[in-house]
Image (tube, rainbow, N blue to C red):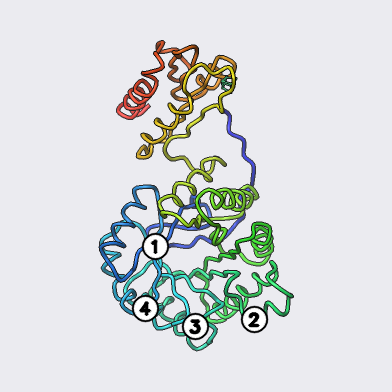
């Protein structure tokens, strides 16, 4: 199908994070954060490997204490994607994380306010060429800024970040990525829009504390999706109260749905209606569970009847348009054969396997 461009991407600096670039012309990346105990190296590495398999391109770990900070180089040596240390309150943890060779640091301007401590971090990060994300979170804005703007507003969020950006720039540190996350979608949108007019640093997008998987997915898709559609955003993290692998899957679906990245299966299926004469809900559910590991970008359509079925199935790489108890299998718009309902899944998977083997 013809792809429609819906935005012009905001121009930003390009920041190197280990083997990955964020901003500039770099692809918008998908990231996540572990919820394992960073003091437990094995559990953390295993979770990062699962995230990597799901398509995570950058991973953040919490560093709440010195033991966690001391584990970072060992964790990094066992994983294949860049590692970000998430530090709050204690600047010594940031210094230790930098010493351990992390690829990026995340600081919250709301909870390390001591200028001398920040300067020590800036000096160490500059020395090792490690970028820093200035990650403003609505839950930890300094009270004086909240009082100035009478609550959490986009201005509150932006001012909190600018305070730290200003200090960094005064010390010639420009290796910066910014995030301005709240759990309220309109406030988050306007915070990023406001900041986009003020700086050229790349943005890490997210709706923070978005909630459990179902509603958090919707909030994140709306918030992140609107900004991306306006050309704002360089890396995304979906925050869910769920297995972080789900965050990565949702992140990819957001990028895929806007045509910004390609990865894995784009599954098209109809909602069914009174015309459907096969058990499409069950077929699609079973099929979906078998497609998780596919990385090759491919569109598969599974449609319930002849109204829209043949049209969608023809546009897809592989498709089935169902009839009464059977369906017609399409490959790149051409009819391959008629298939009984009981063989829909195996027929689609066989076609998929063949396409993967021949890479067409
Ligand atoms: Fe109904 Fe057919 Fe449309 Fe599916 S493709 S929703 S079964 S009309």
Question: How much space separates mark 3 and mark 1, taking CA atoms?
Answer: 26 Å
Question: How much space separates mark 4 and mark 3, taking CA atoms?
Answer: 18 Å
**Badge 2 local density, few (<14 within 10 Å), some, or many (20+)?**
few
Q: Is residue 237 visible?
A: no
Q: Secondary structure at mark 4?
A: loop
For marks 4 and 3, the one nearer the N-term is 4
Contact flag, marks 2 and 4 (Cβ < 8 Å): no
Q: Secondary structure at mark 3?
A: helix
Question: How much space separates mark 1 and mark 4, taking CA atoms?
Answer: 15 Å
Question: How much space separates mark 1 and mark 2, taking CA atoms?
Answer: 29 Å
As drawn, 225 above or below 154:
above
Q: Secondary structure at mark 1?
A: loop
Contact flag, marks 1 and 4 (Cβ < 8 Å): no
**Badge 4 local density, few (<14 within 10 Å), some, or many (20+)?**
some
For marks 3 and 1, the one nearer the N-term is 1
Q: Is mark 2 within 8 Å of ligand 1?
A: no
Which image quadrant is residue 317 in? top left
Residue at left 49%, top 25%? Answer: 316
**Badge 3 local density, few (<14 within 10 Å), some, or many (20+)?**
some
Label at residue 35: 1
Contact flag, marks 1 and 2 (Cβ < 8 Å): no
Label at residue 65: 4
Q: Residue furthest bottom?
A: 116
For marks 1 and 4, the one nearer the N-term is 1
Q: Secondary structure at mark 2?
A: helix
Residue 92 position within the rendered picture, expressed as x and y whole percent measured from the top left: 40, 83
Residue at left 73%, top 79%? Answer: 148
Q: Nearer the viewer, residue 360 or 270?
A: 270
Label at residue 118: 3
For marks 1 and 2, the one nearer the N-term is 1
**Residue under numbered circle 2:** 143
């Amino acid at each position: 199908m013809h792809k429609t461009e819906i935005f012009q991407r905001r121009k930003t600096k390009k920041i190197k994070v280990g083997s990955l670039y964020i901003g500039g012309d770099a692809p918008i990346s998908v990231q996540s954060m572990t919820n394992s105990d960073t003091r437990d190296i094995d559990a953390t590495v295993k979770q990062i490997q699962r995230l990597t398999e799901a398509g995570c391109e950058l991973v953040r770990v919490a560093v709440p204490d010195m033991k966690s900070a001391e584990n970072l180089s060992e964790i990094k040596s066992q994983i294949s994607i860049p590692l970000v240390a998430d530090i709050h309150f204690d600047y010594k943890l940031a210094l230790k994380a930098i010493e351990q060779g992390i690829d990026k640091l995340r600081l919250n301007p709301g909870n390390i306010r001591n200028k001398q401590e920040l300067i020590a971090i800036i000096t160490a990060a500059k020395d090792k060429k490690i970028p820093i994300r200035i990650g403003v979170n609505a839950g930890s804005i300094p009270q004086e800024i909240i009082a100035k703007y009478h609550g959490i507003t986009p201005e509150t969020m932006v001012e909190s970040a600018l305070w730290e950006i200003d200090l960094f720039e005064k010390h010639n540190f420009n290796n910066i990525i910014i995030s301005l996350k709240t759990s309220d979608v309109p406030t988050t949108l306007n915070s990023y829009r406001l900041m986009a007019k003020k700086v050229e640093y790349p943005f890490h997008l997210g709706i923070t504390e978005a909630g459990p998987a179902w509603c958090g997915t919707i909030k994140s898709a709306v918030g992140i999706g609107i900004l991306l559609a306006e050309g704002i955003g360089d890396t995304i993290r979906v925050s869910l109260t769920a297995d972080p692998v789900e965050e990565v899957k949702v992140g990819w679906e957001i990028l895929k749905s806007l045509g910004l990245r390609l990865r894995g299966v784009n599954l098209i299926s109809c909602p069914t209606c009174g015309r459907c004469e096969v058990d499409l809900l069950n077929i699609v559910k079973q099929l979906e569970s078998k497609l998780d590991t596919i990385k090759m970008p491919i569109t598969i359509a599974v449609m319930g009847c002849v109204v829209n079925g043949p049209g969608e199935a023809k546009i897809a790489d592989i498709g089935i348009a169902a009839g009464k108890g059977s369906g017609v299998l399409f490959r790149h718009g051409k009819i391959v054969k008629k298939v009984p309902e009981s063989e829909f899944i195996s027929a689609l998977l066989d076609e998929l396997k063949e396409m993967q083997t021949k890479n067409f």
